[in-house]
Each structure stands twice: as C-alpha cells, then as structure tokens.
Image (tube, rainbow, N blue to C red):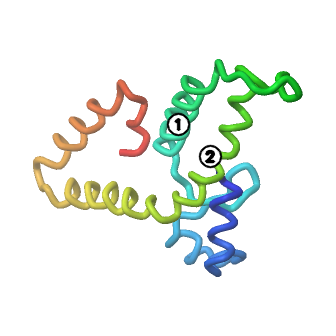
C-alpha cells in the first residue's frame, strides 16, 4: 500500500523531495523506509478491516489443480497484496479530506473556549474503546 502511495506521489511530482515544508504540507512521513502519506492508526484500522473482509470471502477458495497449493488461506495474502496496492492508489485522493476533517475538529475544540477541554475529553473517551484515541 505504501509503495502505491509513493508511486502516486512520485508521478504527481511531489516526491522526491527533502524540503521539510513540502513534506509536512502533504503529511508525508518515512514509513518502513518508504516515503508515504502518514495515515496513522486510522489507516491501519482501515487496512485491517479490508484484509478481514478479503479473508472472510477468500479463505475457502478452491483453485485449479495446478494452482491448488495457493488455494484456501494461502490465497488471502496474494489477493490482499493486490487489493491493498489498489487501495494505496486511492489513499492520496481520499486521505486529505479525512485529514482536513480531523484538523477542523481540532480547530473547533481550540476555539470552543471553556468548553474545549470538555469536548476534547469526551472525544478522547468515545474513541478509546476503538483504539482511535491517538488520532485525537
């Protein structure tokens, strides 16, 4: 997925660059040595849900005899690699909308005055059971 995002960023002319301002403006981090858009925990949860859905659909697949070794649960990593590569091409188009929404919530809480800490604490507690409190 990160390779697909890197491919998209390179073709758009954003990469390769070492200018910190450009990298920060596009939310680009080095992830496993690959410059990619940093989706954080939310991106990991989305990837996990997609792979779970692929596993539920393909864990019992039966392939022709010549490819039977790759059937069943062995097929799940193969299809996951292909699908997550395609998801990686969509992330640079969709993720800026999520990032603006998260940033907008932060600005709203910051300008809420005395109710800001209450909104922050409430949001943190609501996200805690899902492990998404890190994005807040």
The outermost residue toward the right is 66
Position of the C terminus by quadrant: top left
Q: Quadrant of residue 3?
A: bottom right
Identified at 73% across, 57% down, the residue is 34
Left or right: where does residue 126 sit relative to residue 29?
Answer: left
Camera-nearest residue between 76 and 124? 76
Instruction: From the top left corner, tell me how far across and down residue 129 is, in percent.
Output: 35, 24
User: What secondary structure is found at the residue carrying circle 2?
Assistant: helix
Identified at 62% across, 45% down, the residue is 83
| Of pointers 2 and 1, the one earlier in the residue sequence | 1
Q: Is 18 placed above or below 93 here?
A: below
Dots 2, 1 in contact, CB < 8 A: yes
Q: Quadrant of residue 30?
A: bottom right
The outermost residue toward the front is 64
Identified at 63% across, 61% down, the residue is 5
Camera-nearest residue between 136 and 52? 52
Q: Is 120 placed above or below 49 here?
A: below
* Residue 84 circle label: 2
* Residue 50 circle label: 1
Left or right: where does residue 126 sit relative to residue 17?
Answer: left
Q: How many labels does the image show?
A: 2
* Residue 37 circle label: none
Camera-nearest residue between 37 and 68? 68
Instruction: From the top left corner, tell me how far across and down residue 33 is, in percent.
Output: 76, 54
Instruction: From the top left corner, tell me how far across and down residue 53 is, in percent.
Output: 52, 30
């Amino acid at each position: 997925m990160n390779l697909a995002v890197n491919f998209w960023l390179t073709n758009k002319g954003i990469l390769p660059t070492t200018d910190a301002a450009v990298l920060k403006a596009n939310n680009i981090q080095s992830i496993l040595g690959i410059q990619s858009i940093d989706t954080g925990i939310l991106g990991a949860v989305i990837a996990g849900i997609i792979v779970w859905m692929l596993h539920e659909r393909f864990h019992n697949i039966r392939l022709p005899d010549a490819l039977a070794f790759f059937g069943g649960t062995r097929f799940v990593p193969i299809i996951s690699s292909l699908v997550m590569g395609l998801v990686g091409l969509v992330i640079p188009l969709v993720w800026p909308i999520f990032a603006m929404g998260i940033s907008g919530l932060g600005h709203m809480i910051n300008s809420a005055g005395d109710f800001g800490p209450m909104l922050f604490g409430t949001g943190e507690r609501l996200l805690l059971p899902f492990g998404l409190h890190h994005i807040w």
